[in-house]
Amino acid sequence: MLLLEVISGERLAKPERGKMRVHKISNVNKALDFIASKGVKLVSIGAEEIVDGNAKMTLGMIWTIILRFAIQDISVEETSAKEGLLLWCQRKTAPYKNVNIQNFHISWKDGLGFCALIHRHRPELIDYGKLRKDDPLTNLNTAFDVAERYLDIPKMLDAEDIVGTARPDEKAIMTYVSSFYHAFSGAQKAETAANRICKVLAVNQENEQLMEDYEKLASDLLEWIRRTIPWLENRAPENTMQAMQQKLEDFRDYRRLHKPPKVQEKCQLEINFNTLQTKLRLSNRPAFMPSEGKMVSDINNAWGCLEQAEKGYEEWLLNEIRRLERLDHLAEKFRQKACIHESWTDGKEAMLQQKDYETATLSEIKALLKKHEAFESDLAAHQDRVEQIAAIAQELNELDYYDSPSVNARCQKICDQWDNLGALTQKRREALERTEKLLETIDQLYLEYAKRAAPFNNWMEGAMEDLQDTFIVHTIEEIQGLTTAHEQFKATLPDADKERQAILGIHNEVSKIVQTYHVNMAGTNPYTTITPQEINGKWDHVRQLVPRRDQALMEEHARQQHNERLRKQFGAQANVIGPWIQTKMEEIGRISIEMHGTLEDQLNHLRQYEKSIVNYKPKIDQLEGDHQQIQEALIFDNKHTNYTMEHIRVGWEQLLTTIARTTNEVENQILTRDAKGISQEQMNEFRASFNHFDRKKTGMMDAEDFRTCLISIGYNMGEAEFARIMSIVDPNRIGVVTFQAFIDFMSRETADTDTADQVMASFKILAGDKNYITVDELRRELPPDQAEYCIARMAPYTGLDSVPGALDYMSFSTALYGESDL
């Protein structure tokens, strides 16, 4: 309670004088209530803990008191407590080297911060220049000693603790630094007073400077206006546009370069004047009164006179420029029109005096006339320009243009040349029209010549092409058609010769006109490039080609007659051999299908057929010879037969293959019948069934026909069983069943044949009912060659009851019938 009274300067309630615990708690509560009344929130601090001697709680409460009464009241620029104290330290130590106060712990470790605070307020106490940053103990002890001796600030901190701690205690340093703040608060007030005086003096100095600046700026601006107005009032005219344009350019420079800075100065002058008056009024000073003639109103009046002179000068410049511009425009217009006219007339006199029409063709003459008419139109159009040139020259004379003599001379030259062009133009038109009439007659003859020469030339070229064209014919009728067309062509030759003579007569008439009237022909006929020499040359060539064509047609006619004989000879033989091969094929097919006689009778019959077929081979060879002659003659078609040699060859090969295959099938049937013990009646039944279900009559049944056949003879089977049967009769999986395969299957199903089980049972009897058989038993019971056959192929027996030399007859039996590998 005493501590609070001393630090706050206020009286607390009367304390309890008892020594009991309750009295102590009451006194502590009074102190805590006083602290709370000052707006301090006490968290987790109770009277009982303080009375019980809780050091942590006691220290926390003491720090709260220090923070509230020693630090919280510190205020620097609207910041208080810790932030205000830190800002005060930063402001005071800012000028000092190696001092950078950012917090209340490590920023103070080197001691320079404490020394800087003391030196800032009492520089005579510390020689700051001798302090070193690398000697913190000396710095700290110096600061603590000086503060305790001269500033009455107790030594709250220990230098060794601060240096030896990575982060000094923030609360301790803040408390110690706050002592400096309170100690120097009187000095702060003196500094504030000095700042106020400096501020007043600075305002007064600034106002005086503004007054001086105004006076100088006003004097300079009025002097510039005084010099500029006479220049703007000068109205001395110039004789040339260039000189006036230079004046205008000077005026533009004035407007663009010289005046804008002065406008800115005038504006700045007014701003400075208003600013000065405002500052004087705010600082309770009397208003500023400029020197005589330098008031803002005086400057505005002078500026108005300047702008009036400027406006009049600009109007005068523009009027003078427009006046000179009119003269220059007329002179330039005269020069331009004169240059255009002279450029147009350049070479026109020489062109009109040309005699190019003397060697020109009619089309060129007409083109020259059209060109001349266009020139006459152009000449008439240029009449206006000549009149305009004369009018401009007259106006320049009236306006007393300085270069009028040269203008008049040039105008006179243009007018004289214009009159000469008119005379030459009329003379050239007359010469062109006279030449045109003469050439029109020649042109009509040229055109007639071209109209008749072109088709006649095309006819001759076509005739030469046809007469020299190679022809390829394959029949006697084609060569006869070519011969007939050639005879028709020869009949037209007399009329063609008359047309040739008429065309040449037209050309002769043109030559007569040229010689009579001495026409200088510049070239040949413009409508055609065909000359009389070409016509005569091609006509002679046609007459030479006609007999050559006659000879070629006769030779080809003889060749086609020979080819026709070869065709007839081949066709006669092929029409006999082809049907004979077809008939034999059908007869062999009937033998293999029909059941006339025994298999031996059928075999004999087939061998007789084979013999007759072999005897027919010479006729095939003879036909081959005829075919070779046809190929050598390059004959590609034959209307006398539908059979080609390729058809005959294929049929002959098929016939030989069919008789051989059919014979082999009958022989196999005989072997099967004898091996299986099938009677002739059964064989006939098999053939009848097979023929019945061979619906396509190809000698083979497809899978569905075979299934139907099996069902008809009593088989009842599923898909798996049918697939097994098909694998037997069609092992190659081609999808058809031949008659031989059908016989094999039916004989296997109906005959008493050995099976793998029967053979296995027989071996078991020889082995004495054992599951294996020995080598000795085989050699004892079977013939030697068959015994050795079995020994070489039987695998060793591997059962549990095996003995040395035991052989597996079971796997051997299944292998004999293809049910496993032998």
Image (tube, rainbow, N blue to C red):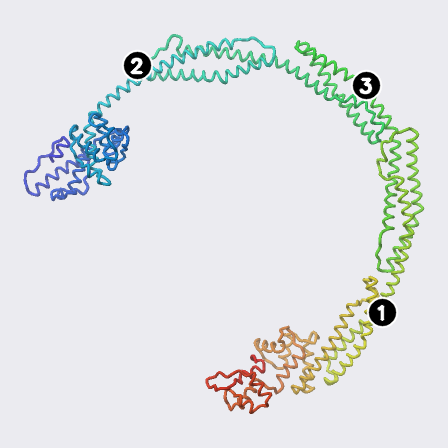
Q: Dot 3 corresponds to which residue?
A: 423
| Circle 1: residue type | Ala
Q: CA distance from mark 2 to mark 3?
A: 101 Å
Q: CA distance from mark 1 to mark 3?
A: 100 Å
Q: Which quadrant would the N terminus be assigned to in this image? A: top left
Q: Is residue 744 left or right of residue 304?
A: right
Query: Marks 2 and 3: CB-CB under 8 Å?
Result: no
Q: Dot 2 corresponds to which residue?
A: 285
Q: Of callouts 2 and 3, which one flags the residue occurring earlier in the amino acid sequence?
A: 2
Q: Is residue 512 left or right of residue 618?
A: right
* Residue under the point 65% across and 10% down: 402
Which element is circle 3 on? helix
Q: Residue 100 or 249: which is nearer the viewer? A: 100
Q: Which mark is residue 216?
A: none
**Which of the 4 image quarters holds residue 699?**
bottom right
In percent of width and height, residue 781 lies at 56, 91
In percent of width and height, residue 589 lies at 74, 77
Q: Residue 797 or 721: which is nearer the viewer? A: 797
**Which of the 4 image quarters holds residue 155?**
top left
Q: Is residue 332 left or right of residue 589?
A: left
Please say if 99 is above or below 617.
Answer: above
Which element is circle 1 on? helix
Q: Residue 72 or 304: which is nearer the viewer? A: 72
Please say if 165 is above or below 705.
Answer: above
| Circle 3: residue type | Ala
Q: Dot 1 corresponds to which residue?
A: 572
Query: Marks 1 and 3: CB-CB under 8 Å?
Result: no
In percent of width and height, residue 684 lies at 70, 84
